[in-house]
Image (spheres, coloured by chain):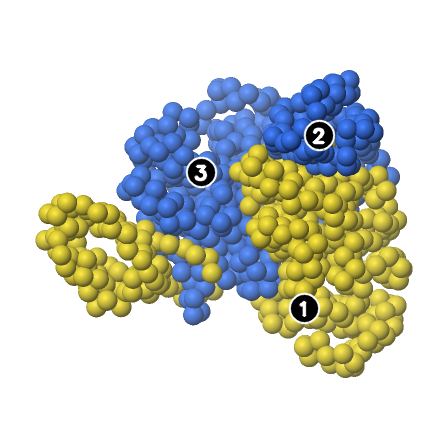
Chain colours: A blue, B yellow
Amino acid sequence: MPMKEIGIGLLGFGTVGAGVVEGLQENGDLLAGRVGARLALRKVADIDLERDRGVKVDRAILTKDAFAVVRDPSVDVVVELIGGCSIAKELILEALKLGKPVVTANKALLAEHGAELYRAAEKSGAGLYCEASVGGGIPVIKALREGLVGNEIQSICGILNGTCNYILTEMERERIPFRKALKDAQEKGYAEAEPSLDIDGIDTAHKAVVLASLAYGFAVPMKSVHVEGIRSIDQVDILNAENMGYRVKLLALIKRVDGEVEVRVNPTLVPLDHMLASVNGVFNAIQISGDIVGDTLYYGRGAGRAATSSAVLSDLADVARALVGGKACARAMVRADAQGRLRSMDEIESRYYLRLMLLDKPGMLARVAHILGENQISIASVMQPEARKGEHVPVVIVTHDAKEKNFRAALQEIDALDVVSAKTVRLRIEDFR
Amino acid sequence: MPMKEIGIGLLGFGTVGAGVVEGLQENGDLLAGRVGARLALRKVADIDLERDRGVKVDRAILTKDAFAVVRDPSVDVVVELIGGCSIAKELILEALKLGKPVVTANKALLAEHGAELYRAAEKSGAGLYCEASVGGGIPVIKALREGLVGNEIQSICGILNGTCNYILTEMERERIPFRKALKDAQEKGYAEAEPSLDIDGIDTAHKAVVLASLAYGFAVPMKSVHVEGIRSIDQVDILNAENMGYRVKLLALIKRVDGEVEVRVNPTLVPLDHMLASVNGVFNAIQISGDIVGDTLYYGRGAGRAATSSAVLSDLADVARALVGGKACARAMVRADAQGRLRSMDEIESRYYLRLMLLDKPGMLARVAHILGENQISIASVMQPEARKGEHVPVVIVTHDAKEKNFRAALQEIDALDVVSAKTVRLRIEDFR
């Protein structure tokens, strides 16, 4: 039986749109295998049909008429990546009216016109998917809607705007004023030439409204949200905060207090030992606290072509699972007939921390270094404390990457030396490069 | 139309089982509203029918016959919380054979008998759900299976055992040896009297096998995993690591290298500025890197009655969505007719950081303190640098919790003082208590 195909109509062929197309091309087989249906790009609408997006698309499926894409009978699901609050809204409403599920990354639209959109989605029953609207590739909407579905949500605290977090991180690390950090961000492409949507907290507020609406099940109006940005943060306040044991972050704060929901965006002093204080640069993180699960936190890239595409693909997979039938939700991800090649421990490469108990006599360290070298292990650094001659001293050696089997062989030789008085301690180092 | 009911058969009425029952009782309405079906506890099997679990259950549904529960026609889904690899396996296989979806927290069983279980699940098509098997309440299985479904998984690095992480954290923070930290953990109930399953890395390895199998789609054999525990970690190595800019963590490491999959568990030096280094105490965290999304990280409580129950409830919700039909996957979480009460900004409480430019004359700080007091704002601390008399100096005041409207009123008065030379800077403090 051939695999069912789900036809995609893509609205908006910009940065993220091209990323989605690339993802479908590169990981299409993987997705089909996991989901049980093939995701097929059927139509793409954009006002610019000429620009090279770095991905190959059959010109025959390109059109300037977005409404024609929505209405095309070969299109089963509509992906809205146009952005903004005018035509995007009309297109989404049209798709929902036709019973077609919609995947969107449009947080501004969801925040400004949520009531209307959620009403249309409910009436349609087709589904409005918005994983890409908050937190880029972090599956935070899924965590909120499904992973924590058994919980009453008590609070959500998030770093939701990479631009602001980059600026605040640079202000602290480089000891530079806001103006200079903003300029840096603009030069690196992390901030727009007209940066107010980000730095005045509006983008964060849009995302906060989406999260709050999903957490509490009613359309939170954007105008009810108190919003402060980071424009007026002074270097001296960042330093003061640091001295007091805090780091300044722009947070979206959503809390349930006395049966009311509090939604606000403001620069906030976060204790240095809290996970959110460790979120630096353009990364995002969202802490969600539930009445049963307690605190959970989700971290990753909050924006950009790749991260946002990953979220769109996840929504498309959910749509596909829903369209091929409920049972597919339970589709096995582990196949009985699948075979995989496991890497032998011998071949695994790692850096190593070694602690030897070595007799402090001339030439002893050279003997150890020689054994390591013979086994293709090169030394990154050595720490050897001073000691009286003739004593055994702890020597710490940190190595570069080398194979496990070489370490095993080298350590056997080293531990057999008469000048080594105890079994060498070895720990692996992970640099997450 | 009355809401469809999904009948649950619970196997194992221990700590987590009781937590699940409590969750169903307390958040049952919430779950039904979100999922579109009611989760009804129909049968509970345990060898001990007398012990008080702190939750009320109709005695008529209690039985010692677990197989009878599985076969009961009123049971649509089986929740296996017995643990271990003997009877639990037979019960799961029986349920799957009957076409009933299974929810399990049993990582040991999934790791030791994965091939057999996944085969049975695939044949059955009913679904084998295991969110509670790894990372407690952190929806990491869902992130891996669904949230990152569009990604080829490049690596997974996780702190998966709260006992080990607690011991390592205590060794570092309290400068105590392994033996003492283990004793502490046992006294606090974080470690078993016979702790080897945890501290020798076996529990972490079980979870690594579950994650690796789901990430790469084939049943990774437990015996292929290289496992080292934390028993031989010495205090001096933790200190050395710290001096070198690292923290020692027991990590599960799963990587894709040259088309092979590497799975191992070992104590690891993690760079201090990496998020995983900030995971302290009994918490777990898992970094998943995908080819499209890049690095993502998931954090929360990795064990315990509540956290594990949250994961079981999430799986039950997925089962319910699958059983009531595909469309329900897209069920709206925001209802058009729902109303929620939003908290007015005036009523929001927070601690504040205030920075005033105050004329350095006797009695000036007292005037400010008086205004704050009049507005029910109490001061937590004051930092005032020395300055020459008659100059304006920056004074930093940190307050206790107070209402926004009181701050607004107080700041209006303060900024109007002739001895205050600039608009007072105010930042909110979030202590995440």
Viewer-nearest of labels 2 and 1? Answer: 2
Q: Residue furthest front?
A: A389
A326 above or below A58? below
Per the model, the C-alpha gap separating discs 1 and 3 is 38 Å
Report the front residue among A13 and A188: A188
Residue, x 76% and y 78% (percent of image)?
A: B51
- Which x, y percent locates residue B397? 28, 55
A169 above or below B166? above
Circle 2 residue:
A390
Circle 3 residue:
A162
- Which x, y percent locates residue A197? 35, 39
- Which x, y percent locates residue A160? 45, 44
Q: Residues within 10 Å of mark 1 (few under 14, many from 20)?
A: many
**Chain letter, disc 1 residue:** B
Q: Amino acid at mark 1?
A: Gly
Q: Amino acid at mark 2?
A: Gly
Contact (Cβ within 8 Å) of mark 1 with mark 3: no
**Chain letter, disc 2 residue:** A
Q: Residues within 10 Å of mark 3 (few under 14, many from 20)?
A: many
Report the front residue among B428 and B358: B358
Contact (Cβ within 8 Å) of mark 3 with mark 2: no
- Which x, y percent locates residue A21? 59, 29
Q: Quadrant of residue B377?
A: bottom left
Residue, x 44% and y 60% (percent of image)?
A: A255
Direction from residue B119 to residue B234 in the image, left or right? left
- Label tally: 3
Residue, x 64% and y 31% (percent of image)?
A: A388
Per the model, the C-alpha gap separating discs 3 and 2 is 57 Å
Circle 1 residue:
B19
Q: Amino acid at mark 3?
A: Gly
Tell me the tag on residue A121: none
Viewer-nearest of labels 3 and 2? Answer: 2
